[in-house]
Image: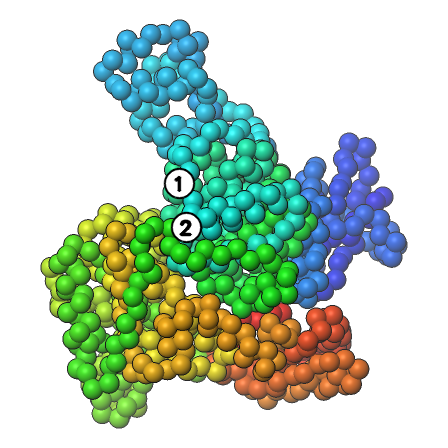
Amino acid sequence: MPILRVALPVPLRQHFDYQMETDENISVSIGSRVLVPFGKRQLVGVVWQIDPSDSFTDAVLKPITQLLDPVPVLGPMLRDLLSFAADYYHHPLGDVLTSALPALLREGRLLNNEKQKLLQLTAEGQSCSDILFKRSAKQLALWLQLKQTAFTETVAVSEFSRATMQQLIDKGIAELISQPFTPFEYLPEKQKPLPLNPAQALSVTAVVQALGRFERFLLEGVTGSGKTEVYLQAIQPVLAKGQQVLVLVPEIGLTPQTLARFEKRFAVPMLTWHSNMTDHERLRCWQRSQSGDAAIVIGTRSALFLPFRNLGLLIIDEEHDQSLKQQDGFRYHARDLAVKRASLEQCPILLGSATPSLESLYNVQQQKFIHLQLPERATSQQVPKIELLDLKQQVLKNGLADGTLAQIRQTLKRGQQVMLFLNRRGFAPALICHECGWLTECLHCSAFTTYHKQSRQLICHHCAATRPVPHQCGNCGSTQLAPVGQGTEQLEEQLGRLIPEFPITRLDRDSTRRKGSLEAHLETIHSGTPQLIIGTQMLAKGHHFPAVSLVVVVDVDGALYSSDFRASEQLAQLLTQVSGRAGRGDVAGKVLLQTHYPGHPLLQDVIQNGYHSFARSALLERQQTRLPPYQYMAMFRAEALDSAVCEQWLALLQQHTALLAQQAPLQWLGPVKAPLEKKAGKFRWQLQLFSPDRKALHQLLAALMQLIQSSALSRKVKWQLDVDPLDLS
């Protein structure tokens, strides 16, 4: 009987062997799913080897319960990618493999051949006359289209309407038939490409010439420089060859507008992939990508693991964004793994951003990436003017200076839109007692609870614990509780009183929680009517709001001082991205930055010289301090109810690191308490590891993994390893 080595979704860093009962009609392949007994449970695993040479004897092996796939769900390329990811991030392979599958496949759903519904004319519809449609221009247009070619139900509904389609079906003129998904058929573009300036044309030519081979490009363009048009014109020859395109965006909020822009240009099947989709929608997208029916997929980071039939180009928009890094479980970085996938697929990868990460700019310096630059806006509009507003000795009304309010009113009266950026959702960061100064703190974290007025709750934004708003101070019993600080909810309420004649649209995680609410808010903004737009960092990335001419950053100072060495980079990126939302239409843009420190060197450098100048000086500073990207970094986190146990466990790793550092270039920082010392009731400690030699660092991590598995102390802590960490909290 064949012996199957199976990778299971368990936290153990090993595989498990099972027997497969022989059956002449059943064959198993590497990459197929199997249902196997594991203790008292039945788990879905992935076959990783067949008849391994170091297996146990047949007599001690359990048989598999069921073979779920006659053909592999994970092909050779995806298996290579996921195996590399498991090794690089030192994560259990079984967990990595199953995390790449849609939820329904992880649960053991049998993979039936998904079918699409095709709308075509019946025999009666082929022979009828257009006189039948003299009272309905829409039905006539649909009938004329179907006379030329049949198309999918999705296309019929999007270009005409479901009612029009159903009317033709009811008359017996058209019918819906089911057929398996097949590779898409390229059709000419719906819209003509926009004219390119020389920098755009050079970028498109460079990417197109690299099609068919692995090449890495960094497209750096100022906000509004037409990066999306470069993407579109680079995609067209890929589609013409019948190849597929994957476009990664950092957040769900960018998928609707990106999809709309692409649908206006191309007449090919396009899909989105993000966490707001249902399990059935995700499985359908997975299958359509695998069959080749999906020509373009626009998705968030996990779309990287879709099984494309013939991937020809990979694009990452806003490549600098931290959302591309998974922050729990399998802690991969989609940008870095996308480069690896492009090398396996032998296709070019294009990273785009107005504020490239220092890691990508370092790769340009090392000649690993080809640098494409768009130094000017695609339209005749100039880069918006940035003005620092000194808040010292000014009277603030609800967090806004009088000069800021005056400019907001003037802009709205001119029929333009105003965007206010405040990267803090909720009504206020905490409630304070006026009698004794007591603040509302989370019972489980070393952090304050945010006051949400609309839901009448205190919510911890770290552990998500909620509790009702107290009526009395928890220290002295006073009822004099008041909000301290400001959030987007409070800003919306106060501006509604100060400027009641104009509507307000608020974009944050709370206001866009319901399905379809984000699209509705964006549609309201794109209507162009004068209004106030309030939001968090959801607004800062990639959005195109032509009617916005004034952007106000309400609180710059909150991000100026931080213990994280990446804080300055993130603030410079955020200010540049937010500023880029202004003046993208026909009216010149202006940006107001409210601060108590207008002379701060970072603010002055970004405003006077731009992000590119800041990035050069930041890279020099990183080189002098031997910080990433000039050194490679990994971090162990430990959590436990007893703080001393965390320190003791990390000290064990540190001692082993010190021994290995005698033969290899290794450095460490810690064990130290995490900046957020307590979270969800557990104390948190860190050990940071550095090395200029990537191989030496990973050899150390492999040795530490063996030490962890053999140490009894490891069972007393919850620990994580983060390779190339971005979040140091």
Residue at image point 37% right, 73% down: 608
Identify whether 462 is placed above or below 416: below
Taking depth in this image into account, of 712 and 463 the one nearest to the observer is 463
The number of numbered badges drawn on the structure is 2
Could you say whether the residue bearing mark 1 is in a helix, strand or loop? loop
Residue at image point 44% right, 9% down: 123
The N terminus appears in which quarter of the rendering? top right
- 263 to the left or right of 705: left
Q: Which residue is mark 2?
A: 226
Identify whether 428 is placed above or below 34: below
| Amino acid type, mark 2 | Gly
Q: Mark 1 packing: few (<14 Cα in 10 Å), some, or many (20+)?
A: few
Question: Which of the two discs, 2 and 1, labels the residue nearer the N terminus?
Answer: 1
Q: Mark 2 packing: few (<14 Cα in 10 Å), some, or many (20+)?
A: some
| Amino acid type, mark 1 | Leu
Identify whether 63 is placed above or below 470: above
Q: Is residue 440 visible?
A: no
